[in-house]
Amino acid sequence: DIQMTQSPSSLSASVGDRVTITCRASQDIKTFLNWYQQKPGKAPNLLIYTASNFQTGVPSRFSGSGSGTDFTLTISSLQPEDFATYFCQQGYSVPRTFGQGTKVEIK
Amino acid sequence: EVQLLESGGGLVQPGGSLRLSCATSGFSFNTYAMSWVRQAPGEGLEWVSVISGTGSTTHYADSVKGRFTISRDNSKNILYLQMNNLRDEDTARYFCARDRAAAAASGGDWFDPWGQGTLVTVSS
């Protein structure tokens, strides 16, 4: 199985800050890496697919990059509605696996 | 509008069974694979199972293999998860989610959209 490791597991940031979350796969997954945002009590919501493609309606302050084993999710200017938990997920093979999540909290 | 609505969760004793359902609307159900993903309280996401659009191909996480069965009724646009021999560690919110394509493991898959989930509690 492909292991997905996110870092950090949590971070505190202020509105307007630039935030970067990283995700590392245990083997080459090409660009088959997706990012989700989850708010408390809600279902996850797809933000970015295949490493760098925006889902419809996702604000342009979100961006994704990477290939192979190392990937990043960047929020260029954190907004109040961005405080949430973010998960990466590899779509390269079954079983599909997720990172453990990164909780973005208000400083 | 694409909608997914799970039901069937509840409290069950260890060793018991439950069948979850996911009623869908707003898209051509039989042209998409469908997955179940679960989230234990306060924990991360764990993929459980996937079924192809035709229902002919299924895959399971090792943690549920032999105990859970995924199925679908394409005439009713409903996805199911039959859960047998439930354990304490199966306690979680179970989400159904639409896959990218019809094949169960086509590569490059993602989950969108997701239902709101149904809570399964396994406890004596």
Image: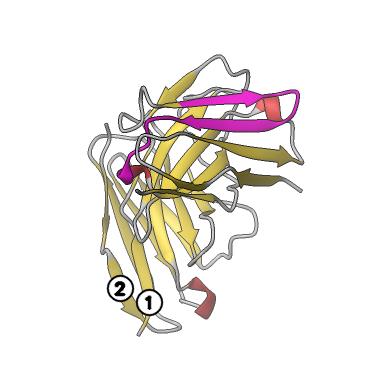
Q: Which residues are magenta?
A: B69-89
Mark 1 residue crowding within 10 angstroms, few (<14) / some (14–19) / many (20+): some
Q: Tag 2, which chain? A: A
Above or below, comparing residue A28 to residue A34 in the picture: above
Above or below, comparing residue B25 to residue A16 in the picture: above
Q: Amino acid at mark 2?
A: Leu
Q: Residue at x 70, y 39 (%)?
A: B24
In the rendered structure, are the residues bearing label 1 and label 2 in contact, judged by CB atoms less than 8 Å apart?
yes
- Label 1: state its secondary structure: strand
Q: Tag 1, which chain? A: A
Q: Residue at x 38, y 50 (%)?
A: A88
Above or below, comparing residue B116 to residue A62 in the picture: above
Along the viewing direction, whichever of B51 and B73 lies nearer the viewer: B73
Q: Position of residue A5 (x, y in %)?
A: 25, 50
**Separation of marks 1 and 2 at Cα, in angstroms:** 6 Å
- Please give the count of numbered marks on the rendered protein: 2
Q: Is residue B57 left or right of residue B46?
A: right
Residue, disc 1? A105
Label located before the other in sequence (1 or 2): 2
Residue that lies at the very extreme toward the front in this rendered image: B124
Mark 2 residue crowding within 10 angstroms, few (<14) / some (14–19) / many (20+): some
Q: Position of residue A46 (x, y in %)?
A: 53, 52
Q: Position of residue A18 (x, y in %)?
A: 39, 75
Q: Is residue B95 left or right of residue B59?
A: right
Residue, disc 2? A11
Along the viewing direction, whichever of A105 and B4 lies nearer the viewer: B4
- Whether residue B27 is visible, yes or no, is yes
Q: Quadrant of residue B68?
A: top left
